[in-house]
Image (spheres, rainbow, N blue to C red):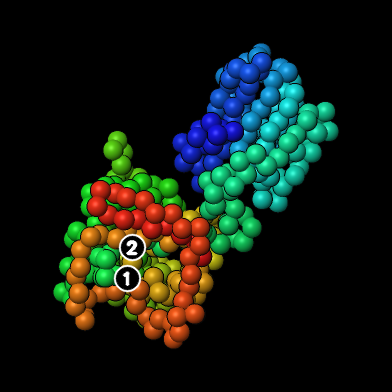
Amino acid sequence: MERALELAAKGRTSPNPKVGCVIVRDDVVVGEGFHPKAGMPHAEVYALRDAGDKAKGAEMYVTLEPCSHYGKTPPCANAVVAAGIRNVYVAMTDPDEKVSGRGIKILRDAGIEVEIGDCGDKARKLNESYIKHRTTGMPFVILKSAMTLDGRIATATGDSKWISCDKSRKFVHEMRAEVDAVLVGAGTARIDDPMLNARLENETLYPRRVVVTKSGNLPDLKMFHEPGETIVAVTGGALPSLNCRVLRAENLKDLFRRLGEEGVLSVLIEGGGETAWSALNEGLVDKVVYFYSPRLRGGRDAVPALGGEGVGKVKDAPRLKNIEVSRFDDDICVTGYL
């Protein structure tokens, strides 16, 4: 199952889940596969093709319950039955109501022994965005920020390049590559003029770019000329006439609801402090990823990682759980869930 999870992580599958599959016969791996992209065959199909005739009487380890419905591909559960698999080990059931337990029922009705739960926590973490979307209709929201040790993301003059190190910034591009949309506030868009693409070693990817603005007053930004889609979400004021798609939204919650309806599974919030606090204050953030540079910036008017009014009492402050700490050269990265 660990190997199946490793394979699953290779896919860029939104709006589908990441799934990996390993087939074992007589304690030897005879087939492997993963779902690479929406619209392409699922993990079980690739693993069965890899195994060929050796699949008959073998065991299958799969990170998510085999699908039971016709979408862009036929049901995987039927293919598993037809191949003569003897035992299936499933890390987690599928939260999608179109599947949820039906795939497992098909297998068991065909006489296949099914066990559920091996590496379930790891499988759920791998597909946390998919699970959130399928169970609530809302995207999984990650709040990312890079700051000095005293919590500043920019000087009073707006200078912010570069707070974090090269390795940290490289990791952020990998984060962008894994999400459906990257969101910033209008202030960050005006000052930084970011492209918000994912520049990887061998390719550049273009998640949706979203700029949230109250006034609708934005300059002609670089992101308006990048491949892919740029969305300007206007919460008040006039609608801009720019090279973008304009959405009128009452607030961030309304915006995320609409993005979820369009099949957006995940949103990465990259700034600034006011937008970050609004998302936290509205209870929309699921995960926080903070990068701390070993610098001390200071300054009463320097820009904090979180703006807004903040909380009145320490006991009311949002508290993270399941904390993980990692290093990128001298930078410290803290990840946690709300």
120 lies left or right of 215: right
> What residue is rendered at 32% in x and 70% in y?
305
Q: Residues within 10 Å of mark 1 (few under 14, many from 20)?
A: many
| Type of amino acid under label 2 | Ser
Instruction: Quickly name the residue at label 2.
Output: 145
Q: Secondary structure at mark 1?
A: loop
Residues 41 and 321: in front is 321
Q: Quadrant of residue 160?
A: bottom left
> What residue is rendered at 68% in x and 24% in y?
59
Mark 2–mark 1 distance (CA, rounded to whole Å): 7 Å
Q: Residues within 10 Å of mark 2 (few under 14, many from 20)?
A: many
Q: Pick out the residue farthest to the top.
A: 53
Q: Secondary structure at mark 2?
A: strand
Q: Is residue 113 visible?
A: yes
Q: Quadrant of residue 311?
A: bottom left
Instruction: Quickly name the residue at label 1.
Output: 305
The number of discs equals 2
Residues 324 and 32: in front is 324
Residue 257 in picture, x, y percent from top left: 54, 66
Q: Is residue 231 visible?
A: no
> What residue is rendered at 29% in x and 70% in y?
151
> What residue is rendered at 50% in x and 75% in y?
282
* Cβ–Cβ under 8 Å for marks 2 and 1: yes
| Type of amino acid under label 1 | Ala
320 lies left or right of 92: left
